[in-house]
Amino acid sequence: SYNVFAAWQAMCGVALIFEQAKVYGKGSMPQAKRVAELAGVAWLGFAYLTYEASSHIEDALAKKTLWTAIAFNAAFSIAAGPGRLTPMSSREPYLVGLNTGIVLWVVANLWSQP
């Protein structure tokens, strides 16, 4: 589940940087494009840290890193789902659901670690 989680975060980061940021930049606040790009870079960082942590899962710092990535991704599900400020596109309910499912899968696996 950890490698799937890392890959998912990397895909979300790349999509945010190269797809969604353009959309946000066309709105009334062009600076939103840069904020979205920055969030995408952060997501790529979480992907890398998740990947590295997964190979040292017995380590306390690795577990803390994964819990931090879980919190970040759970916050996305809330912000893009029930906390959303604008209407969803047709694909966003699926993305939010998939993200939530992956996060819950990782939580279950992390809780089962000694």
Image: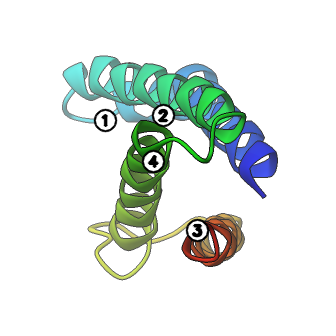
Q: Which secondary structure, mark 4? A: helix
Query: At x 64% / y 26%, what residue is drawn?
Result: 52
In this rendering, the label closer to the viewer, 3 or 2: 3
Residue sitting nearer the eye, 19 or 99: 99
* Structural distance between the alpha carbons of marks 3 and 1: 48 Å
Q: CA distance from mark 3 to mark 4?
A: 19 Å
Q: Secondary structure at mark 1?
A: loop
Amino acid residing under circle 4 = Ala
Q: Which residue is mark 3?
A: 114
Name the outermost residue toward the bottom: 82
Distance CA(mark 1)–CA(mark 2): 7 Å
Relative horizontal placement of residue 55, taking residue 45 as reference (left or right): right
Q: Point out residue 25 in the picture as x, y percentages from the top left corner.
A: 36, 25
Residue 96 in sight here: yes
Residue type, numbered disc 3: Pro
Question: Picture quarter containing residue 10?
Answer: top right
Q: According to the image, label 4 marks what residue? A: 69
Location of mark 1 (residue): 27
Label 2 amino acid?
Val
Relative to 30, is 2 above or below? below
Label 2: few (<14), some (14–19) or many (≥20) C-alpha neighbours in 10 Å: some
Which quadrant of the figure has residue 99?
bottom right
Q: Is residue 50 above or below residue 48?
A: below
Question: Tag on residue 23?
Answer: 2
Element marked by disc 3:
loop
Percent position of residue 58, x then y: 59, 47
Q: Is residue 52 above or below residue 20?
A: above
Label 3 Cα crowd, 10 Å radius (few <14 / some 14-19 / many 20+): few
Q: Earlier in the sequence, mark 3 or mark 4?
A: 4
Let me know if residue 90 appears in the view.
no
